[in-house]
Each structure stands twice: as C-alpha cells, then as structure tokens.
Image (spheres, rainbow, N blue to C red):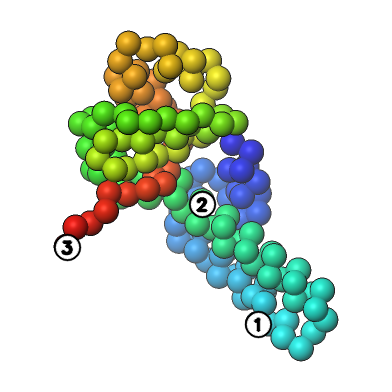
Amino acid sequence: MKRIAEYRKIFASERSTSLADLKNTYRKFMKEYHPDKFAGKEEAEKLEAEEKSKTIIEAYHFLVSISPETAKNNEPTYLESVSNSIITDFQYKGQVLRLDFSDGNSYEYFGVSQDVYKKLCQSDSQARFARRKICTVFTYRQVTQTPVVA
C-alpha cells in the first residue's frame, strides 16, 4: 500500500486515473528527466536524472499493472486462474500477498491484513477462501504469466 501511495503521489494520480492520462504524465516526466537531456552537464545532475527517470519508469509500469483498465483487459485470464486453478504456493510480506496458481500465473494482492493472511493459512480450502475473501476484494497485479508454447 505504501508503494501504491508513493507512486500515485509521483504521478499525482488516483485509482480512477485512466491509462491515457498515466501515459501522458509519464511522457511529460521522461521529456523533463531523460538522462540524454543532461549530456554535457555535471555528472551529479546526470546521475540524479538517471535515478529520477528509473523511479518514474518503475512507478509508471507499476501503476499500469494495477490500473482498473488493465484488470478489465486481463479479466478472462484472471478469472480462469482463480476459478479453475489450485493455489500451489503463497507468500506474505508487508501487506502484500502473492498467490501462485497451478496454471503458472501469479498475482500480488495489496493491503492484505495479517488477520486475513492467518485465516487463509488456517482455511480448510485455501483456494475457496482466496476466491471469496481475497481475489474479489483487494487490488492486484499479475506478476508472472503462463508461458506461451509455440
């Protein structure tokens, strides 16, 4: 949650900010902070611009990954994973829960309380608990995908 708030602050965005608006803000920032723009200037300025641009790129990709538009576009794959696959592994760290599914997809859920995590661990059916209490409630992003076989 802290990372989400931090990145939204950088982009001055909200949950409902469209992908087009994020992209426009990203382009504006990159025009301003691109390291090539600082060629021939002091090394400290160039290094600062590189760090700032890395942060902007990371924030942009993260915000795109949790955007409601991205979630809507990936909804069929997401529903297929959470409905028809079993949970093969899960990890919890600092209110971020990662669920790995048997179809090869993995998702991170943000803002998951320790209480919800404990209930998941103690549940008779972790997949059912996750479908009801996690997958439909928390902001998520896909972190790995099923490899495409040619």
Q: How far apart are marks 2 and 3 (CA)?
A: 28 Å
Residue denoted by label 2: 62
**Residue at point 64% right, 75% down?**
34
Of the numbered discs in the image, which one, if any, rests on residue 36?
1
Do labels 3 and 1 touch, CB within 8 Å? no
**Residue at point 47% right, 31% down?**
91
**Residue at point 30% right, 23% down?**
127
- Residue 133: give x, y in percent of width and height: 39, 20
The front one of 44 and 16 is 44
Say few, some or many: other residues with alpha carbon within 10 Å of mark 3 (under 14 / 14 to 19 / 20 or more).
few
Q: Which of marks 2 and 3 is in front?
A: 3
The front one of 84 and 61 is 84
- Sequence-wise, the earlier of marks 1 and 2 is 1
Residue denoted by label 3: 150
The three-letter amino acid code for the residue at tag 3 is: Ala
- Sequence-wise, the earlier of marks 2 and 3 is 2
Q: Distance between the residues labelled 1 and 2?
A: 24 Å
The three-letter amino acid code for the residue at tag 1 is: Asp
Say few, some or many: other residues with alpha carbon within 10 Å of mark 1 (under 14 / 14 to 19 / 20 or more).
few
Indicate the secondary structure of the residue bearing disc 1: helix
* Visible residue check, residue 111: no
Indicate the secondary structure of the residue bearing disc 3: loop
Quadrant of the drawing holding the C terminus: bottom left
* Visible residue check, residue 93: yes
The three-letter amino acid code for the residue at tag 2 is: Phe
Indicate the secondary structure of the residue bearing disc 2: helix
Quadrant of the drawing holding the N terminus: top right
Total numbered circles: 3
Report whether 14 appears left or right of 66.
right
Report whether 32 appears left or right of 113.
right
Q: Nearer the viewer, mark 3 or mark 1?
A: 3
